[in-house]
Image: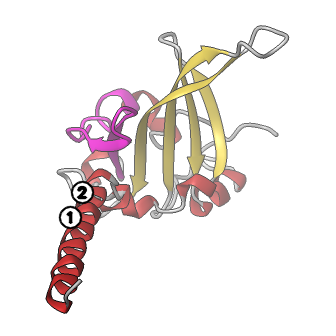
Amino acid sequence: MKRANIFKLAAAAAVLAALGAGVYAQEKQDKYSLKTPSGIAFSDFRGYEDWVMVSSALTPNDRLKVMVANPTMIQAYRAGIPGNGQPFPDGSKMVKLQWKIKKDAAAQFDVNVPDTFAEVFLMQKDSKRFPDSGGWGYAVFNYDPATSKFTPTADPVTCGHGCHLAVKAKDYVFHPYQTR
């Protein structure tokens, strides 16, 4: 093979590799680059996968919800907040992870287990940024298992005035830190 042909072949291979990498980069999503219209960034919750579990719940529509909190919020819970009448400090963050459930066919007893991941709900305490909702900012990122991608939904900015208003006396937080 002539030297010119080798260079052409190498150049073509480099172009194909670059195109392939571009397609792969488009398919693989960095969830931490996402942000809601109000500016709540997924990256503000980096590391939530390792946070301490606060509570769990099973909804009537067969969704398993597991709430985890950052160290700031866990420390506040352990200090008696919100039961002692004090609000959570700014910097407190909670993540609610949601899965659809299924029966575990392998178990020797009747048990439901997580199946398809569905959603991430974020709560962030920042009294200066979110003064109109008790100091809490809220965000929801839906997960599409077919594409393995998260999509921010329209901000549930009414949470502080709507559904979370029912627990205003608990600093707008539904779930207590469960006994272990």
| Residue 127 image point, x, y percent | 35, 60
View extreme (right): residue:
108
The residue lying toward the viewer, choosing from 131 and 73, is: 73
- Asked whether disc 2 touches disc 1, contact meaning CB atoms under 8 Å apart, the reply is yes
Question: x, y percentage for residue 38?
Answer: 20, 53
Q: In this image, 80 relative to 89: left or right?
A: right
Residue 86 percent location from the top left of the image: 56, 52
What residue is pinned by disc 1? 19
Q: Residue at x 47, y 11 (%)?
A: 61
In which quadrant of the rendered image does the C terminus lie? top right
Q: Secondary structure at mark 1?
A: helix
Q: Amino acid at mark 1?
A: Leu
Front position among marks 2 and 1: 1
Question: Which of these two is toward me, 83 or 160?
Answer: 160
- Whether the magenta-drawn stretch holds residue 141 is answered as yes
Segment tinted magenta in the rendering: 136-164
Residue 126 appears in the picture as rendered:
no
Q: Residues within 10 Å of mark 1 (few under 14, many from 20)?
A: few
Identify the image quadrant of residue 72: bottom right
Label ID, residue 23: 2
| Mark 2 secondary-structure assignment | helix
Label 2 crowd (10 A; few <14 / some 14-19 / many >=20): few
Which residue is located at x 67 percent, y 41 percent? 177
Q: How many marks?
A: 2
- Rendering colour mode: secondary structure
